[in-house]
């Protein structure tokens, strides 16, 4: 299972990519390079959202188990809205 430590690594990677993007803009980089960096940033952001969603699903499942509910009860709607918020 993904962890918040994984998200921290993704955030570090995102930060480095954004710094790289800024340097490229200041150094009159080609649009091809800017597009490449923007794509990498997008992929890392999607990875962070997916990790948050996975952690949220696991936590909601555990909370439902502790409440005495069935394993799948209600977690789908919560995780679905969390995933939608993470991607927006």
Image (cartoon, rainbow, N blue to C red):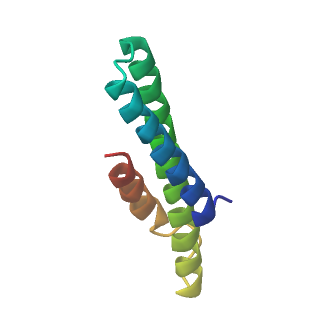
Q: Residue furthest right?
A: 1
**Number of numbered callouts drawn:** 0
Q: Residue furthest front?
A: 27
Expressed as whole percent of the image width and height from the top left, the position of residue 62 reads: 59, 77
68 vs 82, left or right, is: right
- Work out whether residue 6 or residue 79 is closer to the camera in this orientation and state it: 6
Residue at image x 64%, y 58%?
2
29 vs 52, left or right, is: left
- Work out whether residue 83 or residue 23 is closer to the camera in this orientation and state it: 23
Expressed as whole percent of the image width and height from the top left, the position of residue 71 reads: 59, 71
State which quarter of the image contains the N terminus.
bottom right
Residue at image x 55%, y 54%?
51
- Work out whether residue 45 or residue 55 is closer to the camera in this orientation and state it: 45
Position of 56 relative to 64 (above/below):
above
Residue at image x 46%, y 34%?
20
Q: Residue furthest bottom?
A: 67
Position of 36 relative to 20 (above/below):
above
Residue at image x 36%, y 57%?
81
Expressed as whole percent of the image width and height from the top left, the position of residue 60 reads: 51, 72
Expressed as whole percent of the image width and height from the top left, the position of residue 35 reads: 40, 20
Position of 54 relative to 71 (above/below):
above
């Amino acid at each position: 299972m993904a962890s918040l430590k994984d998200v921290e690594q993704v955030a570090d990677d995102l930060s480095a990519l954004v710094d790289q993007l800024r340097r490229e803009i200041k150094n009159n980089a080609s649009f091809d390079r800017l597009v490449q960096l923007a794509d990498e940033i997008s992929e890392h952001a999607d990875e962070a959202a997916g990790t948050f969603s996975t952690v949220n699903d696991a936590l909601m499942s555990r909370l439902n188990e502790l409440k005495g509910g069935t394993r799948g009860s209600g977690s789908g709607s919560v995780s679905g809205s969390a995933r939608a918020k993470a991607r927006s």
